[in-house]
Amino acid sequence: MIIGIAKEIKNNEYRVCLVPADVQTLTADGHQVLVEQGAGVGSGFSDDAYKAAGATIVGKEVYTDSDIFCKVKEIEPEEYPLFRPGQIVFSYLHSNAHPEMTQFLLDNEITAICYEDIDDKEGKFPLLIPMSIFAGKGGFIAALQYSQTIYGGSGKILSNIPGIETPHITIIGAGYSGMAAAEMASAFGNQVSLLDLDVKILQKAKQSLPPNVEFLLSNRTNLLKCLKKTDVLINCVLWPKTRKDHLVYRSDLSLMKPDALIVDVSCDEAGAIETSKSTTHDDSIYSVDGIRHYAVDNIPSAFAGSSSELLSMSILPYLRKVAKLGVKEALQADPHFRRGLTTYKGKLTLKETAEKLGKPFTDPLDALNM
């Protein structure tokens, strides 16, 4: 099977989906790997490194000549004409947030598999977890940067320094990104409040975090108390696209310190944070009612080398399965892998996207068996 690796064209996206070490595994399996020229440069991997791993360096024909086309982010409109009908696309597609792209996939009968929707026997998302960890840690690092005076921030150092008041960091959600942010914030000595809906998750979190972290049930009362004292609010809760309510409303911003910062790791537009909208690394910060917001939707790209390695090793087993068995058989045999199937032969097979976009839904197993 021919596997293609794209060079990302999204603004400030420097990651690559497969690194040379994992390309070598695929070529050793007997598959041909096409790498678009310069695909790995932003992550520190040269074309020569891919050649040494057995790949062939090509131009834009990587789109049409591949059986399986691998990316990191969603398909951009400029890429639409480069695809051929019936291809297999494997990427973080976020289909419910990109209706035009989803329609393109349907119209061209492209088999699209989303990294972020594949789950496992424990109900976890193995291809989303690695980037969630990077996003959580990167979110706190962004808070460090944008709290600096030279970046228009409060001028407070987010650390415990004897003689001055210790900053307070509030983190919503004790999942992988929330825990990663809490690890960083607490290691710097800040007073940290970690909120979650599940007491058992908080109890587990307490076992691995230091005493300067408090663990609060995520309810309206506790959240408002935290908003009044926090210097940085970090949201790590994914918000269902169909929900119309919020955790932090625009009116709540008036409770916050005038120099407070909101870092929305999840970047759900008007989601858990009503005033949230996606930003880029080029233009990261905006203000609403005097409160600065950071909502970059590809934080891991700032650490492209490390995050690419982790992403690559995470997707490799799934890619090898498809390359060996074929997409239909691989998805039929594995219900957790099948959870990531978004479009197949013109059918929309991801329920959440169908509900969000108001389009007909086809059960993925039914679609595969048609």
Image (cartoon, rainbow, N blue to C red):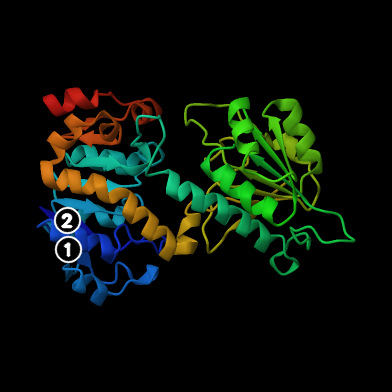
Question: In the drawing, does residue 148 fall left or right of residue 305?
Answer: right
Residue shown at 13% from the left, 35% from the top:
328
Q: Local crowd at mark 1 within 10 Å, few (<14), some, or many (≥20)?
A: many
Residue shown at 11% from the left, 57% from the top:
31
358 to 65, vertically: above or below: above
Q: Residue under circle 2?
A: 3
Closer to the camera, 353 or 216?
216
Closer to the camera, 34 or 74?
34
Residue shown at 59% from the left, 26% from the top:
200
Give coordinates of residue 125: x percent, y percent.
Answer: 40, 38
Secondary structure, mark 2, is strand
Q: Quadrant of residue 13?
A: bottom left
311 to 43, vertically: above or below: above
Q: Are marks 1 and 2 in contact (CB under 8 Å)?
A: yes
Give coordinates of residue 240: x percent, y percent.
Answer: 49, 30
Q: Residue under circle 1?
A: 34
Q: Local crowd at mark 2 within 10 Å, few (<14), some, or many (≥20)?
A: many
Secondary structure, mark 1, is strand
Q: What amino acid type is highlighted by mark number 2?
A: Ile
For marks 1 and 2, the one nearer the N-term is 2
Q: Is residue 80 something one can see in this rendering?
A: yes
Give coordinates of residue 202: x percent, y percent.
Answer: 63, 32
Give coordinates of residue 46: x percent, y percent.
Answer: 30, 75
Q: Is residue 263 something one can see in this rendering?
A: no
